[in-house]
Image: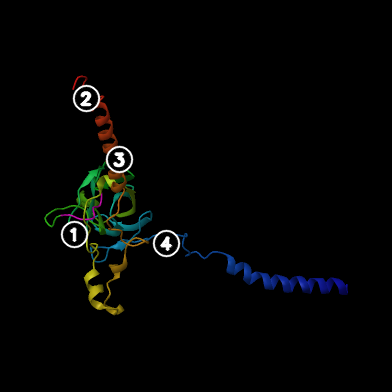
Amino acid sequence: MRAIRVWGAALLVLGLAAGPAAADSSPSPGASDGTGSSAPTQAGTSFRTATEIQQGQQATASGSTGDYLYWSFPADTGQRPTVEASVTLPRTHGTQTWQLDVYDGLRRRQSCQYGSATRTADQGASSVELACVMRTVRGWAEPWANDPLPGTYYVRLTVVDLAAADLGQPVNAEVRVDSKDIGGPAAVDGSLGKPLVPGIAVGSAAQGDDSKTAVLSSFGSRDGWSSGWWSDRWVWTGIGAVLAALAGIGGYALTRGSGRPPGV
């Protein structure tokens, strides 16, 4: 009996010691998924309050029909971003038309190469899907041009046509941004001095004063902005030069003949 009591006390002590360790090792409900930050679950209501998301994140938000939902994301040189949005509609509603708009850092509306940026949901539809494939981000452009440049881009999602009875009904939205690296075929000579990021001038003028640094001044790629001189166009240019030289040598070998004609 004494031995049983000793073994029971030992097991009780081990159980108390292992309990906190097991609790500490379990993931917390708010832990991130390994991407450095959890996906946002709300959207902004204007350009200034746009919710920041990274490419590859699935952002969600709840709102009402008639609200303007804003997100912002970074895009660098050589990338062709694709913005996709899905809106879950209420059970009973009339015909609604939703629109997805993309703006650059200067708040200029960017056109879509292809994709359905405006779609109409029929009466009783459960959801509506929208997509916008942007043009390739360039490293440099003329001041008068509307070309997409590296920096922050804004996504605005809203309903543009609906019945008055459907105004204010709850909806759920999902937004995701992915991009494809185009590289040399879309590369241009020259580079942008600073990316089109809100607050970049304020952050430069502050000179170390964190109180004046804008929130979005460091919002960008993990490896920094890559508006540089190198692109894979240099490789294709070198290959073209070698092929041109070989063609010239071959043409000379075929046309030079065997030398002087006989009797000269």
In this rendering, the label closer to the viewer, 2 or 1: 2
Instruction: Report the front residue among 254 and 55.
Output: 254
Q: Position of residue 64 (x, y in %)?
A: 28, 57
| First in sequence: mark 4 vs mark 3 | 4
Q: Amino acid at mark 2?
A: Arg
Disc 1: which residue = 107
Q: Amino acid at mark 4?
A: Ser
Does dot 1 land on a helix, a strand or a loop?
loop
Q: Which mark is residue 50?
A: none
| First in sequence: mark 1 vs mark 4 | 4
Q: Position of residue 67 (x, y in %)?
A: 24, 58
**Distance from the alpha carbon under mark 4 to that under mark 2:** 81 Å
Outermost residue toward the top? 263
Q: Amino acid at mark 3?
A: Val
Magenta range is 136-141
Q: Which mark is residue 242?
A: 3
Q: Which mark is residue 260?
A: 2
